[in-house]
């Protein structure tokens, strides 16, 4: 039997997420000169049609390329190839790929499966009002235009609901979800999604509906409001222009 020297971990290769494959395709077009510096890319809808993929994956790919400095996003105008994008790509070694973030679409899918049930369980087990949840809601009310503070309070609020269940596995899962919501790609798309006036306040109002149902011990209402809230988050982050 042939023995291989143990010079590598021989770990299984990760399969790239769909948004990463789209981003790699667009970066390859920039590297090859098929997309020139300053050139405007087709719209998200048109790119999705041409590439035969979902619009949400296209939006994630464009955001990832913008975070990597290869695209510039101009509100109301679209995405453009950065003037120094070819130079950035030429200087990059194969090992210099940008860090992988979880797909926001995958994260939203997971949240929609988990968090409404967490809200229902929290309502069954919480003992009335919760000072920490109320404090976080007050932060969101007071600072809708402070993206960092608002996003931090948002993540902590959802984690707090899990804490109210008393289930250590759910608490750990909520902690992992909160960490994924702190990744740059999620933050970029979340910030873009609530940039339109009033959207942060709408989300905060939805949080208050969830909390009120939990504090009242109404599991059905808590689950309903959590589901409605996450559906709106999904629509704002992946579908709206």
Image: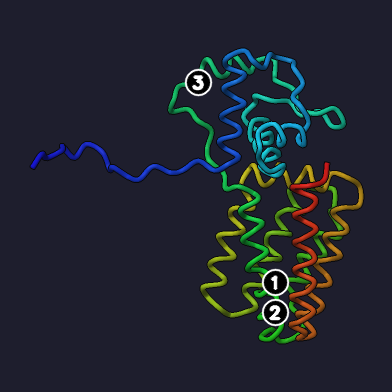
Q: Quadrant of residue 219?
A: bottom right
Q: Can you say which quadrant of the picture contains the C terminus?
A: top right
How far apart in space, not on screen, are marks 2 and 3 (Cα)? 48 Å
Front tag of 1 and 3: 1
- 82 relative to 216, above or below: above
- 215 relative to 18, above or below: below
User: Label 1: which residue?
Assistant: 116
Q: Position of residue 192 (x, y in %)?
A: 78, 42
- Asked if marks 1 and 2 touch (Cβ < 8 Å), the reply is yes
- 116 relative to 10, above or below: below
Residue 131 vs residue 168, the one in the foreground: 168
Secondary structure of the residue carrying numbered label 2: helix
Secondary structure of the residue carrying numbered label 3: loop
From this viewpoint, which residue is outermost toward the right? 197
Residue 128 vs residue 225, the one in the foreground: 225
Q: Position of residue 3 (x, y in %)?
A: 11, 40
Secondary structure of the residue carrying numbered label 1: helix
Left or right: where 74 falls relative to 12? right
Q: Can you say which quadrant of the picture contains the N terminus?
A: top left
Please tell me which residue is depicted at 66% across the width and 56% down the height of the picture.
Answer: 108
Q: Earlier in the sequence, mark 2 or mark 3?
A: 3
User: Label 2: which residue?
Assistant: 120
Please tell me which residue is depicted at 28% across the width and 43% down the height of the picture.
Answer: 9
Q: Quadrant of residue 20?
A: top right
Circle 2 crowding by C-alpha within 10 Å: few under 14, some 14–19, many from 20: many
- 165 relative to 233, above or below: below
Please tell me which residue is depicted at 70% across the width and 44% down the height of the picture.
Answer: 56
Left or right: where 168 falls relative to 158? left
User: Label 3: which residue?
Assistant: 92
Q: Position of residue 4 (x, y in %)?
A: 15, 38
Please tell me which residue is depicted at 72% across the width and 42% down the height of the picture.
Answer: 55
């Amino acid at each position: 039997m042939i023995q291989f020297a143990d010079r590598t971990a021989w770990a299984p290769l990760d399969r790239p997420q769909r948004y990463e494959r789209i981003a790699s395709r667009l970066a390859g077009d920039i590297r090859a000169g098929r997309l020139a510096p300053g050139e405007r890319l087709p719209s998200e809808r048109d790119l999705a049609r041409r590439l035969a993929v979902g619009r949400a994956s296209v939006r994630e790919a464009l955001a990832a390329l913008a975070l990597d400095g290869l695209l510039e996003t101009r509100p109301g105008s679209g995405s453009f190839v950065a003037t120094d994008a070819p130079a950035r790509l030429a200087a990059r070694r194969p090992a210099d790929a940008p860090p992988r973030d979880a797909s926001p679409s995958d994260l939203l899918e997971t949240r929609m499966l988990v968090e409404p049930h967490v809200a229902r369980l929290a309502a069954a087990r919480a003992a009335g009002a919760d000072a920490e949840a109320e404090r976080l809601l007050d932060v969101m009310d007071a600072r809708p235009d402070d993206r960092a503070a608002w996003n931090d309070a948002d993540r902590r609020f959802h984690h707090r609901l899990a804490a109210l269940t008393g289930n250590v596995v759910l608490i750990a899962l909520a902690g992992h979800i909160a960490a994924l919501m702190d990744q740059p790609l999620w933050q970029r798309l979340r910030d873009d999604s609530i940039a339109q006036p009033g959207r942060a306040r709408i989300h905060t109002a939805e949080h208050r509906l969830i909390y009120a149902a939990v504090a009242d011990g109404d599991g059905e209402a808590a689950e309903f409001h959590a589901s409605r809230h996450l559906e709106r988050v999904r629509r704002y982050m992946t579908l709206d222009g």
